[in-house]
Image (cartoon, grey):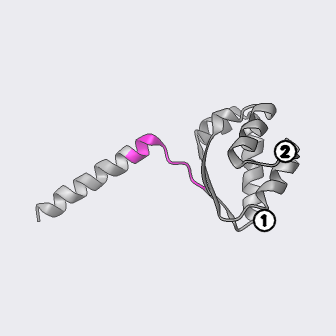
Amino acid sequence: MNLILEAEKMTTRKEAHQYLKEMFAFPDYYGRNLDALYDCLTELKDAQVEFYHAGEELEKENYFAKVYRTFLEAAEANSGLVIREERMADEEENKEEDEKENEEINDGK
């Protein structure tokens, strides 16, 4: 399972747990709190999660910061859960530009 989660959709407790329940297809009995989230995350197998706009939301110190810490703690306890570093759109563009420049340099040799 590979998921990309939007940090801005998890700024309040209610929004965060509804969004996570939908994205992970958590069962109906999911408790919609950080303890229940931790429990569900530590049971995952072969899950890679990437957060978009995490840095921006972490700076705001809203509910997302608690959710993010819970993901990191769960990943420490569960080797089947991997939190990938977020990649910004402009980083992708820079990477593509660098690759093109390298190709041009190598073609010129």
Query: Can residue 59 be seen from the camera position used here?
Result: no
User: Which residues make up the magenta segment?
Assistant: 84-92
Q: Amino acid at mark 1?
A: Ala
Q: Amino acid at mark 2?
A: Asp
Q: Secondary structure at mark 2?
A: loop
> In front here: 13 or 27?
27
What residue lies at 71% left-to-right and 36% top-to-bottom?
A: 10
Q: Nearer the viewer, mark 1 or mark 2?
A: 2
96 vs 38, left or right, is: left
> In front here: 44 or 93?
44
What residue lies at 72% left-to-right and 60% top-to-bottom?
A: 75
Q: Residue reaching furthest front?
A: 28
Q: According to the image, label 1 marks what residue?
A: 77
**Residue 109 placement (x, y as % from top left):** 11, 65
Sort mark 1 into few (<14), some (14-19) or many (20+) by Cα contacts within 10 Å. Answer: some
User: In the image, is residue 42 above or below residue 52?
Assistant: below
**Residue 27 placement (x, y as % from top left):** 82, 48
Which label sits on residue 28?
2
